[in-house]
Amino acid sequence: MRAPVEVLELFSGIGAAGIALGERARVVAAFDQDPVANLAYAANQGRSPLAKNLAGIKPGQLSAFASCAWWLSPPCQPHTVRGAGRDLEDPRSAALVRVLEAARALRPPLLALENVPGFAVSSARQRLRASLDGYGLAEAEICPTALGVPMRRRRYYLVACRDRNPSLECPAPVPMRPLAAYLDEPGGSYLPEAEVRGYGHSATIVDASDPGAVAHCFTSAYGNSRVRAGAYVRDAGGVRLFSPREILRLLGFPGGWHFPPGVDLRKSYALAGNSLSIDAVRWVWAAALGP
Ligand SMILES: C[S@@+](CC[C@H](N)C(=O)[O-])C[C@H]1O[C@@H](n2cnc3c(N)ncnc32)[C@H](O)[C@@H]1O
């Protein structure tokens, strides 16, 4: 039996990239500067990420992981409309730039990256590709809806292999699972109907009993901003926000995964909204790790 591939999880957040790994690979270290994300990661994954600002990382500090597969989920705000699309000019891109310098120096055998679709047309992507000179590369965009999950979250993925040409083939179509399968029983706090009517067409409300319902992408502003941060759901009790637990389910987190005590609702939404579709990442890992 082959030894599991060792993985370095960078910008680890609440750890979706590690959770998506099958038995062929395991995370040996993770890095994230957010202490609350690290707390949630540790409460569930049993190991704490290293709390470091990657904008100051030097290749020597990552050399112990030179033989690992690197997973990167850098901040997406430099490539979104909400984040003003400043690309490499955005100070939040500094950490990605430093990690790419380390990758260029250390040449890990495998590197994979996730970001929003805007990344595909960015200077950051050009910098990424230039840092991977000599690697076999595959790039694709996928939405969890293509994997049967009733939630939109289209994302750009890149897989780079030092010794082979990977391919990210479109998955075969699968039937969409009903949204109801991801929802809790009706209950909790509902929005006043007058408030709901006031949103007009700027808010998307999905019907829990509609077998074709698809939730819009949840962002880190969900629960904070009323519009364009994710969908609302109408069930037997009225219209309400999706709960963090329902969002985690749609993202593919395992049933027992939980936010530890002390993580408030707003932060739970922010961490879930920043995370990844585990179904989509599993598909990327399958391509990255090869046959
Ligand atoms: C898009 S989220 C990644 C989410 C993660 N993949 C997950 O499953 O939750 C980006 C992450 O990068 C972290 N981050 C942003 N800038 C950073 C920096 N300069 N150094 C270290 N971590 C950083 C954030 O705290 C956040 O958790």
Image (spheres, grey):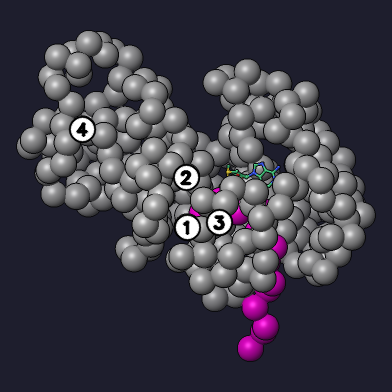
Q: Disc 4 or disc 1, which is closer to the eye?
A: 1
Asked whether disc 2 touches disc 1, contact meaning CB atoms under 8 Å apart, the reply is yes
Residue type of the residue flagged with mark 1: Ala
Residue 240, numbered label: 4
Task: Answer whether labels 2 and 3 touch (C-beta < 8 Å).
Answer: no
Q: Secondary structure at mark 4?
A: strand
Q: Which residues are magenta?
A: 1-14
Amino acid type at image mark 3: Asn
Tell me the number on the disc at residue 271.
Answer: 2
Query: What x and y, as percent, mark residue 171?
Result: 49, 51
Give the residue pinned by disc 3: 38
Residue drawn at the location 82% of the way across and 50% of the way down = 57
State how far apart marks 4 and 2 are (Cα).
19 Å
Tell me the element at label 1: helix
Magenta run includes residue 178: no
The crowd level at tag 4 (other Cα within 10 Å; few <14, some 14-19, many 20+) is many
The answer to which of marks 4 and 3 sits earlier in the sequence is 3
Whether residues under marks 1 and 3 lie with C-beta atoms below 8 angstroms apart, the answer is: yes
- Asked if disc 4 and disc 2 are in contact, CB closer than 8 Å, the reply is no
Q: Which mark is residue 40?
A: 1
Residue found farthest to the right = 105
From the viewer's perspective, is residue 183 above or below residue 253?
above
Q: Earlier in the sequence, mark 4 or mark 1?
A: 1
Image location of residue 167, percent across then percent down: 67, 53
Tell me if residue 230 comes above or below residue 37 in the rendering: above
Residue 238 is situated, as x and y percent measured from the top left of the image, at 11, 30
